[in-house]
Image: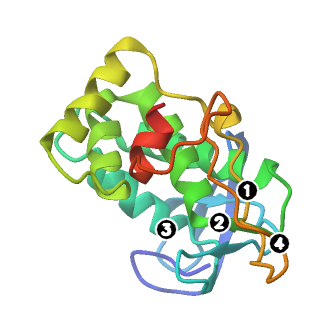
Amino acid sequence: MRCPYCHFRDSRVTDSRAADDGIRRRRQCTACGERFTTFEAIQLSALQVVKKDGRREDWNREKVLAGIRKACSKRNISVAQLEGIVAEIEAKVMADGRPELPSSFVGEVAMDVLRKADHIAYIRFASVYRPFTDLASLKEAVFALEEGRIATLQERNLQLPLPPSESAPSRPRLVHGGSANRDLPDHAEALS
């Protein structure tokens, strides 16, 4: 571990404590004597995120944190709360257990967590994540948030789509409640 003050490579641990998502270690540099804190966390198994265009990327916590940070900018949310939000998103994503998850699932988990943490941050994130086509669809999302009509992640039951089969007939998309609804935009389905 490099000392952040003199960049010497050797330090000794003076204190270790359990933290929410790992171990907090207090260290002292053996060269300059300055003290600093490090956090040790378990590296989770490799998770692949399937993008809308079919590309696969490794799970990147920093990418999620950057998106959440943008949504929460100029809100009364501390760095510790941001870390907690990202830790909750990561825990829910990892708890799913699948080795590959669609990016839409990760986005929905992030929106669920943000909805509980801060409504403005939720709307900011949703306005980028969901393609609102006009002011009316954005207003509908705000009204749904106020009325508590936004479906939870479990109600949406998001999964990777099956590959298209040439012999299988195409079926209409189903929305919450089981009714076919082909003419609603994607973001309106989630509000149904």
Q: Which residue is mark 3?
A: 62
**Image coords of residue 190 (percent x, y):** 49, 39
> Badge 3, how many Cα within 10 Å: few under 14, some, many 20+?
few
Q: Give the residue type that dot 1 points to.
A: Gln
**Image coords of residue 101 (percent x, y):** 71, 65
* Pair 3/2: label in front: 2
Q: Is residue 185 left or right of 98 when viewed as pictured?
A: left
* Pair 4/2: label in front: 4
Residue 22 appears in view: no
Name which of mark 4 and mark 3 comes first in the sequence. Answer: 3
Q: Give the residue type that dot 3 points to.
A: Glu
**Is mark 3 in CB contact (under 8 Å) with mark 2?**
no
Q: Which residue is mark 2?
A: 102
* Pair 4/3: label in front: 4
Name which of mark 4 and mark 1 comes first in the sequence. Answer: 1
Q: Nearer the viewer, residue 92 or 177?
A: 177
Give the spatial CA distance, label 4 vs label 2.
23 Å
Give the spatial CA distance, label 4 vs label 1.
19 Å
Q: Nearer the viewer, residue 162 or 141?
A: 162
Q: Nearer the viewer, residue 182 or 18?
A: 182
Seen in the picture, residue 138 relative to 129 is either above or below; the reply is: above
> Badge 4, how many Cα within 10 Å: few under 14, some, many 20+?
few
**Image coords of residue 64 (percent x, y):** 48, 61
Residue 105 position by quadrant: bottom right
